[in-house]
Image (cartoon, grey):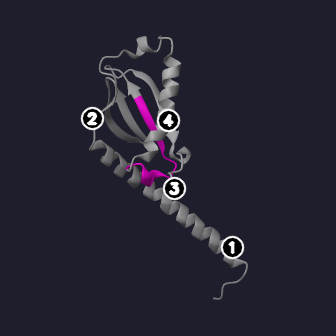
């Protein structure tokens, strides 16, 4: 059957939809690959006494668990300057975008997360960055 002018746009919409669905299906696999690659490097020092202990996938989130082996989240949240610390850590999220394991996730709906916990798994705070907001790599 010859392609009519009316059917051509419908075919383009169908092909675009199939392409989008194919990309979505690859995201869970890309997340697992990123997790597996990063996990091989852990545990690893993060900053001062902080340790990046593990990495996991939670839905469309790649979560790096950063532990303070001596800190106390409840006490630390009361310290003046805590909000500045959280903001500083939020700004550091962009550094994850440059990791080779994260590169295949660019262009997806994945969210990068650093979860800071104390020795008792009490949450200090989390920082997040959708990979869609990653800075463009240098040309």
Which one is in front in this view, the residue at disc 3 or the one at disc 2?
3
Q: In this view, does 14 lie to the left or right of 126?
A: right
**Quick one: label 1 or label 4, which is nearer the N terminus?**
1
Mark 3, residue position: 139
Mark 1, residue position: 9
* Marks 3/2: CA–CA distance: 32 Å
* Marks 1/2: CA–CA distance: 52 Å
Q: Nearer the viewer, residue 15 or 73?
A: 73
Q: Residue at x 73, y 78 (%)?
A: 6
Coordinates of residue 96 in the picture (x, y in percent)? 43, 41
**Quick one: label 2 or label 4, which is nearer the N terminus?**
2
**Quick one: label 1 or label 2, which is nearer the N terminus?**
1
Which one is in front in this view, the residue at disc 4 or the one at disc 3?
3
Tell me, yes or no, whether the two marked residues, 3 and 2, touch with CB atoms within 8 Å. no
Mark 4, residue position: 128
Mark 2, residue position: 43
Coordinates of residue 72 in the picture (x, y in percent)? 37, 15
Coordinates of residue 122 in the picture (x, y in percent)? 38, 20
Q: Considering only vertical position in the picture, is 86 above or below 24? A: above
Disc 1, SS: helix
Which one is in front in this view, the residue at disc 1 or the one at disc 2?
2
Q: Is residue 4 left or right of residue 73?
A: right
Q: Which residue is drawn at 43% across and 58% down?
A: 26
Q: Residue at x 49, y 17 (%)?
A: 82
Segment colored magenta: 101-115
């Amino acid at each position: 059957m010859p392609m009519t002018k009316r059917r051509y746009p419908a075919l383009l919409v169908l092909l675009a939809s199939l392409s989008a669905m194919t990309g979505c299906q690859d995201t869970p696999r890309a997340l697992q690959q990123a997790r597996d690659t990063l996990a091989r490097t852990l545990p690893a020092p993060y900053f001062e006494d902080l340790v990046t202990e593990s990495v996991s996938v939670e839905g469309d989130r790649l979560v790096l668990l950063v532990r303070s082996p001596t800190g106390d989240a409840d006490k630390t949240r009361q310290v003046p300057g805590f909000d500045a610390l959280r903001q500083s850590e939020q700004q550091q999220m962009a550094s994850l975008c440059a990791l080779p394991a994260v590169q295949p996730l660019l262009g997806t709906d994945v969210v990068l997360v650093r979860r800071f916990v104390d020795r008792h798994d009490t949450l200090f705070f989390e920082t997040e960055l959708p990979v869609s907001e990653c800075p463009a790599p240098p040309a």
